[in-house]
Amino acid sequence: MIRKLALTTLIALTLAAASEAREERVLRTRLLEARPAALRAVSAPGETMPLRLFDDASYVAVLEDIYDHPRNGLVWRGHLENRFNSWVLMVEHRGALAGVIATGNRIFRIRFAGAG
């Protein structure tokens, strides 16, 4: 099943401690078609999945852990290959996909935009 997702990239305007408020602003967005089943295809720690977020933002996600959620969902956690202090978190629930990808001062948010 293919679902449309809105991919929003944000940048932190300030580096803040956990107790301080963070200001973020949207730089750009795009709609894309994603296949949530691709998360399940990468099922062993160390396996990789390409992420083409924008023309100038392509990464390779490396799986660290994958969890089946008891209510028809999946949690996929990892990091970006060759990117120090990066992380990837994706959640699939009943065919809808959402996630956050962070590297350096770039944060990409993936959200479900409805069936398409």
Image (cartoon, rainbow, N blue to C red):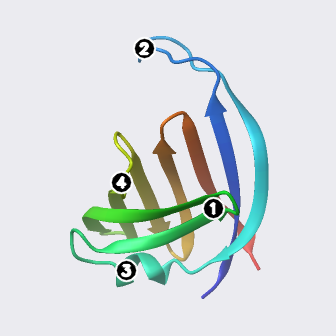
Quick check: 20 left or right of 89?
Answer: right
- The kind of residue on which mark 3 rests is Arg
Residue at x 72%, y 71% (from the top left corner):
32
In the rendered structure, which disc, 1 or 2, sits on the residue that comes first in sequence? Answer: 2
Image quarter for residue 35? bottom right
Residue identified by numbered label 3 = 40
- Report the mark closest to the observer, 3 or 4: 4
Q: Amino acid at mark 1?
A: Leu
Question: Between residues 46 and 65, which one lies in front from this camera angle?
Answer: 46
State the image coordinates of residue 80 (x, y, percent, origin top left). Answer: 39, 55
Question: Residue at label 2?
Answer: 17
- Looking at the rendered structure, the kind of residue marked 2 is Ala
Residue carrying label 1: 53
The answer to whether the residues at label 4 and label 1 have Cβ atoms under 8 Å apart is no
Q: Earlier in the sequence, mark 4 or mark 2?
A: 2
C-alpha separation, residue under disc 4 versus residue under disc 2: 25 Å
Q: CA distance from mark 4 to mark 1?
A: 17 Å
> Of callouts 3 and 4, which one flags the residue occurring earlier in the amino acid sequence?
3
| Residue 13 quadrant | top right
Q: Is residue 71 left or right of residue 14?
A: left
